Image (cartoon, helix red, strand yellow):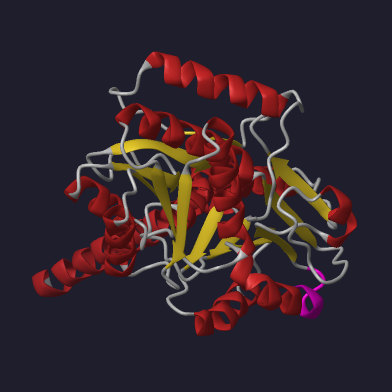
Amino acid sequence: MRVSHRFSIFTALLAVLVLAGLAALVGSSSSQASPRASKATFLASLVSDIGKFTDRSFNQSQLEGLKRAKTKLHINILPLQSNTTSDYTPNFNQAVRASVIANFAAGFLLADTLETFADQFPNSKFAITDYCAKGSASKCLAGNVLTKDHPNVMGLDYAANQSGCLVGYLAAEVTKKHGGKQVIGAVGGLHIPPVDIWMAGYKYCAKLFNKHIKVLIDYSGDFSKSDLCKTIADNQIAQGSFVEFQVAGGCGLGALKSADAHHVWGIGVDKDQSKDAKRVLISGVKHVDLGVFNVIKTTKAGKFKGNHDLQFTLANGGMGVGKIHAGVPKAFITAMNKIKAKIIAGKLHVPKKLT
């Protein structure tokens, strides 16, 4: 009887414990239901260009804009790195299959892929850096226009020639002060319009300061391999270049290293690259991060507008310059800022194409 009695008590206690455990599980599930329901359902993707997210420049800046949107706008993000051009299609395919609401193409080379997916997925929204929508052709700052209208595509258009002008003007100023051969250089990645537009401004305004200055321009054919850009910069410096402007993403970091090694000046691009080398004179800054963030903000608010461009200039802060080296005379900076004021006022028109 004692055994039976004890068994009955044990059985009762076990039943109570089981019920208590089930209650706890139910309570736990219900307490987590609210946070799950409140999680962000807006998903934004960014397909990088072949320069990769580690370029400390163009692609990395856009990734920073995507991450800022995640933090400030409470969205989910899907960054997709392209190591080669063959990654574009599978990356976009992954994005649209994941029900991404805002899909970003990080640059000029992705235009064909973006247009294909925009046609195939008309209910998805897309944006592309360094391109204009068809409807804005006459007003496109950079001059790169998609082949046709897409009601689900926005363009992100940057006046890189304006910032290129400012860094070119300063490059000519410091070269004049240094004396000797009046030569400066620029190292590009691929010979494409978003690279050339920087070069156009750089060359035009260097010659605006000193019409006799020689501007060397060469291309590595690559956005990643820094040794290629270093070799080109080495060769330009051997020809007398006192300033090296890099417009080649991660590859261009090699040009900055070359400038350090030869004790001449380097100029960064897209982001403030003053910390990426010891002798960075200035950087031409292109706020591609702002473009990504603004499209997400607009789309999340239900105000996405296809066949429309967001444009970025010196006037609206979408273009600019980075930290200027402490060794630059204030008078040089003042002169450069006067050029900036003329551009903003429409009194100086900087070409988009190299001549």
Find out whether residue 352 is within the magenta segment: no
Is 313 rendered above or below residue 288?
Answer: above
Q: Nearer the viewer, residue 73 or 181?
A: 181
- Report the side of 179 relative to 318 (left or right): left
332 vs 288, left or right, is left
Q: Position of residue 103 (x, y in %)?
A: 65, 63
Q: Quadrant of residue 134?
A: bottom right
> Which residues fall within the magenta stretch?
118-123
Residue at position x 43%, y 29% in the image: 173
Residue 317 x, y percent position in the rendering: 62, 31
Total count of labels: 0
| Residue 47 percent location from the top left of the image | 55, 67
Q: Is residue 246 visible?
A: no
Query: From the viewer's perspective, is residue 73 above or below residue 317?
Result: below
The quarter in which the C terminus is drawn is bottom right
The residue that appears at 52% across and 85% down in the rendered structure is 86
Q: Nearer the viewer, residue 54 or 97?
A: 54
Residue shown at the point (81%, 77%) measured from the top left? 119
Identity of the residue furthest to the left in this view: 2
231 or 177: which is nearer to us? 177
- Is residue 98 visible in the rendered image? The answer is yes
Residue at 51%, 68% (x, y): give it.
Answer: 49
